[in-house]
Amino acid sequence: DIQMTQSPSSLSASVGDRVTITCRASQSISSYLNWYQQKPGKAPKLLIYAASSLQSGVPSRFSGSGSGTDFTLTISSLQPEDFATYYCQQSYSTPPIFTFGPGTKVDIK
Amino acid sequence: QVQLVESGGGVVQPGRSLRLSCAASGFTFSSYGMHWVRQAPGKGLEWVAVIWYDGSNKYYADSVKGRFTISRDNSKNTLYLQMNSLRAEDTAVYYCARDQTQWDILTGSPTHSMDVWGQGTTVTVSS
């Protein structure tokens, strides 16, 4: 089974900061990697699919990159509404198994 | 508007069964695959199961295989999760989510993501 890890597990940042979150797969998953944002008590929200494609309606300050085993989610200028937990998820496995990473919590410094 | 509404959660004793429902509206339900994802209290997201748009294929996480069954009724725009032999570790908020399939133009392979989510329904397994 493909395992997903994220780093850091949490970070503190200020409004306006550039934030980068890393996701690593235990084997190559090509570009079959998605990113989600979740706020407390709310359902997750899709931000990025296929490693680098911005989901419709998501602000352009969010971007994704990477392929193979190493991926990053970047928030170019952190906004107050961006404080949340971010999860990566792979969709490469056959048969389909959609493993999530453990999450990265972004809070206010 | 596009909406998913889960129901059926509650408190159940270990070993008992529960069926969750997810009512879809605002889109052509029969054209989309659907997922169940759960989140234990204070924990991360765990994918549970997926069903193809026509019900032809179903896949499960190892943690629920043989105990949970995903199904759908396209005439009722409703997704289901039948949960049997429930355990304490099944305690979680259960979300249904719509599958968004994009086709990789280079490889011709599909990529899957979850683009619409319900608000979740809480299942507590406790004696």
Image (tube, rainbow, N blue to C red):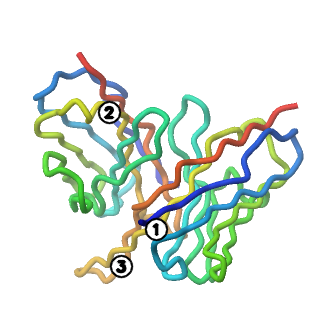
How far from the left and from the top, in percent, is residue B111? Answer: 37, 70
In the image, B11 versus B56, the foreground residue is B11
Name the subunit of mark 2.
A
How far from the left and from the top, in percent, is residue B67? Answer: 79, 57
How far from the left and from the top, in percent, is residue B45? Answer: 51, 43
At label 1, counting other C-alpha atoms closer than 10 Å, the crowd grade (few under 14, some 14-19, many 20 or more) is: many
Which mark identifies residue A7? 2
Give how far apart the Cα atoms at labels 1 and 3 are: 15 Å
Which part of the image, by quadrant, shows the C terminus of chain B?
top right
Secondary structure type for disc 1: strand
Above or below, B73 relative to A27: below
In the image, B7 versus A25, the foreground residue is B7
Tell me the amino acid under the disc marked 1: Asp
Secondary structure type for disc 2: strand
- The reply to whether the C-beta atoms of the residues labelled 2 and 3 are less than 8 Å apart is no
Q: Nearer the viewer, mark 2 or mark 1?
A: 1
Give how far apart the Cα atoms at labels 2 and 3 are: 29 Å
Q: Nearer the viewer, mark 1 or mark 3?
A: 1
At label 2, counting other C-alpha atoms closer than 10 Å, the crowd grade (few under 14, some 14-19, many 20 or more) is: some
Name the residue beneath numbered marker 1.
B99
Tell me the amino acid under the disc marked 3: Ser
Tell me the amino acid under the disc marked 2: Ser
Taking the image as shown, residue B73 lies to the left or right of residue B107, namely right
